[in-house]
Each structure stands twice: as C-alpha cells, then as structure tokens.
Amino acid sequence: MGDSQQGSDAPPPALTYNPQQGTRFHTLSADSADTGPLITPSSAAGAAASADAPVPLSDDPSSRLVKIREVRDAGVRDHATPVERAEAQMRKALSTMQAIDETKRVKVLAQQLNSSLSEMEEYQVEALLEELQYLCEDIDRASVLHAFKGLAPTLHLLSSPHAGIRQRAAYLVGTCAQNNPKVQQQVLELGGLPPLIHLAREEQNIDVL
C-alpha cells in the first residue's frame, strides 16, 4: 500500500525555462533520464520563417516563360479575359492616336498663328490661344510649339493692344515654359523676357495678370 501511495503521489512533470536554452519538457516518468525535446526560440523562429518563405521559381524553361507572360502586360490584369485584354489594347491604341492627333493640332494652330494672324478677328485669336494653352499643358507638345513656329508670334502678342489677347498669350507662354528648360531657353533667345517684364510692371488690366 505504501509503495502504491508513493506512486500515486508522484509530482507532475516538471517544466523548466532557461532564456538561453529555451523551454524543456520533462517526461512523465520520474525515473527516466530522458528530458524530452528541447524547443528553443531560434528553432521556433526558423520554423516560422521556413513556412512563410516563397517557393523558388522552377528552373524549368517553360515555367519561366509562363511567369514572363504573366507580367508582360503591366496594364492588363493577369486574370483578365480575352475580351478585357482586347479592350485594354484598344484603349492604349486610341490613346496613342489621340496624342498624335493633338500634336498635329498644335502644328495646325501654330501655322495659323504664324501666317493668318492679320486676317483673324480678336475673338478668333483668343480662342486659338486658349486651345493652344490647353494642348501645351502636355510638356512634349509645349516643347514643339517653337518648332512649329508658334512661339515667336505668341511672344509678339504679349504687346497686343487687346487685353484679352495679351492675357491669353501670357498664359500660353507661362504654360509652355513652366518646368520646361528647353522652352525657357527658347523664350530668352527669341527676346521674350523684356515684354514679359513690361507686362508684369506696366499692365493696367488686372485680368491680364
């Protein structure tokens, strides 16, 4: 009875912790010398990291080709249907065509400004300058205004007797030259700085400024 009593009163498995060695679980048997598996913080962290680690891409050429095809078209989602892909390609083509058409429009307007200015009414000149300003908000189109011979007549219009034309010419020059060193240099070479300074100092119409 005494021996069985001692067996039933055996202490529960001991649990020890060492910050350097980790947590050690003892076996259920008090007489066993085996102290059980050792779980350390470094081993636990390593197991978690290995579970989250990305699976490396296969060396199989066909696998690499599939991956390349998936990321080839950045503007189209990988899960897009054939119809969605076709629509995206169409939008891209239309955008390119629109950019080409707008550059051609800058050329047409610049030619009118350079050759037909004397034949145009005041309101027509104002409308032309407004449209050019809108188109030249794109830095690439602003950079070709001088090549299309539209910058020089615009600078000349800074001295127009009509306040509305002076205003729109100044806005157009400012739009083209903003953050555009190429156009800024062109304005200097064409003598555009003095009329701009005069406009800033002497202009009486506040709408122009």
Image (cartoon, helix red, strand yellow):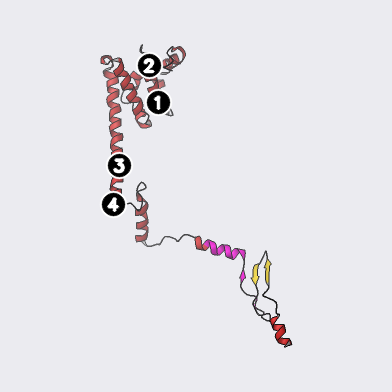
Question: Considering only vertical position in the picture, is 27 above or below 90?
Answer: below
The residue under label 1 is: 175
Report whether 97 appears left or right of 2.
left
Name the one closer to the observer, 110 or 120.
120
Q: What amino acid is at disc 1?
A: Thr
Q: Is residue 70 magenta?
A: no
Q: Mark 3 points at which residue?
A: 91
Mark 4, residue position: 82
What crowding class fits label 3: few (fewer than 14 Cα within 10 Å), some (14-19), or many (20 or more)? few
- The label nearer to you, 4 versus 1, is 4
Among numbered discs 1 and 3, the one appearing first in the sequence: 3
Q: Is residue 208 left or right of residue 117?
A: right
- As shown in the figure, which amino acid type bears the numbered disc 4? Pro
Sequence-first disc among 3 and 2: 3
- C-alpha gap between disc 1 and disc 3: 28 Å
Residue 2 coordinates in the image, percent (x, y): 74, 87
Relative horizontal placement of residue 163, taking residue 107 as reference (left or right) = right
In magenta segment, residue 38: yes
> Circles 3 and 4: CB distance less than 8 Å?
no
Q: Label 2 belongs to which residue?
A: 166
Residue 38 shows up from this direction = yes
Name the residue rendered at 72%, 88% in the picture: 1
Question: Residue 111: x and y, percent?
Answer: 27, 22
The alpha-carbon separation of the residues under discs 1 and 2 comes to 14 Å
Q: What residue type is labelled 2?
A: Arg
Are the residues tagged 3 and 2 within 8 Å (C-beta)?
A: no
Task: Please state if 113 lies on the left or on the right of 202 as rendered.
Answer: left
